[in-house]
Amino acid sequence: MYDPSSGNVTVDVSSDFILEGSGLDLRYALVFTEDGITGGSGYAQTNYYAGGGQGPLVDANGFDYSTAPDPVSASVMQYDHVVVGIVPQYEGAAGSVPANIAFQQNVTYTFSTTLPAPVMNANHVYVNVILLDNGNGGIVVNAAHKKLTNVIDLVEDDLIEASIYPNPARDYFQVELAENTDFELELVNTMGQVVFKQSYTDRNTAVISTSDLAKGMYILNVISGEKYSSKSIAVTR
């Protein structure tokens, strides 16, 4: 949760692990990023589109670089996805994940901190929870993010109703939602690699073939607007 009056931020993390292991050094880290940052002394940007000779170049915010000078002053530049704080440190929180993990074990952890001082506008801040493998060079195993000014805790309104069958799956599996909607399916293997991604429009079912999938465990992310669901599925073919 985020308290604008005090700047206090509390993030409750919950993970269901689909692999088991011992002697691990997995850690959660909390990363604050901000969109729409401007300014900064010495950060003027060279503008090769100045004067219009290269044609127009309009960014996502509607700024046309062909009408801007060279260089473009830092005061009018805008940067997104800027890291403004890492909690507790770059290597993550030691002890936030047990060293020994059983199959399908649920792990919870709570971050209690304050909004980083460099933040310019809390309405543009995102909270990113990252699972790091600190024993393997700090690689990112998994991650999730949510806008700060939304409720950070996972509440019922954030979830999309989805069922998967058959599970375990041999030749295929079907995803069924409670109602027709636009949604996206993302299948992630145990290495954190996205092995399948597909968008669907105004429907409530999707059938996924396992012919190109290796035998093993996967996480299926179902995303529809601000709602989502993550479920584990086993491929046994």
Image (cartoon, helix red, strand yellow):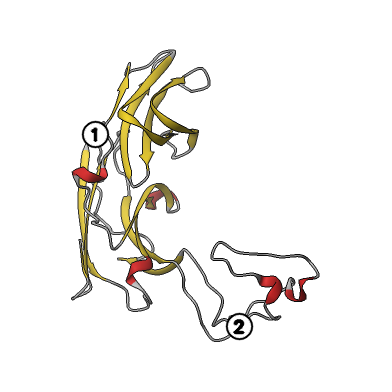
Kind of residue at disc 1: Ala
- Please, what secondary structure does the residue beneath circle 1 have? loop
Q: Indicate which label's residue lies in the foreground, 1 or 2.
A: 2
Read off the residue under disc 1: 102
Q: CA distance from mark 1 to mark 2?
A: 54 Å
Q: Is residue 179 above or below residue 5?
A: above
Does dot 2 land on a helix, a strand or a loop?
loop
**Residue 236 location, x and y as percent?**
39, 16
Q: Is residue 210 left or right of residue 117?
A: right
Three-letter code for the amino acid on which mark 2 is drawn = Ser
Quarter residue 232 falls in = top left
Q: Residues within 10 Å of mark 1 (few under 14, many from 20)?
A: some
Front position in the image: 214 or 69: 69
Q: Residue at x 28, y 59 (%)?
A: 93
Question: Where is residue 172, by image quadrant?
Answer: top left
Question: Mark 1 or 2 closer to N-term?
Answer: 2
Q: Is residue 223 left or right of residue 160?
A: right
Q: Is residue 46 visible?
A: no
Name the spot of residue 168 as percent of width and height, x first.
33, 18
Q: Which mark is residue 73?
A: 2
Does residue 221 appear to the left or right of 1 in the view shown?
right
Residue 196 pos. (x, y %): 49, 31
| Mark 2 crowd level (few <14, some 14–19, many ≥20, 10 Å Cα) | some
Q: Is residue 83 above or below residue 102?
A: below
Q: Residue at x 33, y 71 (%)?
A: 122
Residue found farthest to the bottom: 41
Residue 123 position (above or below residue 13):
below
- Residue 150 percent location from the top left of the image: 27, 58
Q: Who's the residue at 31% across and 32% down the image?
A: 231
Q: Nearer the viewer, residue 96 or 4?
A: 4
Q: How many numbered marks does the figure carry?
A: 2
Quadrant for the C terminus, please.
top left
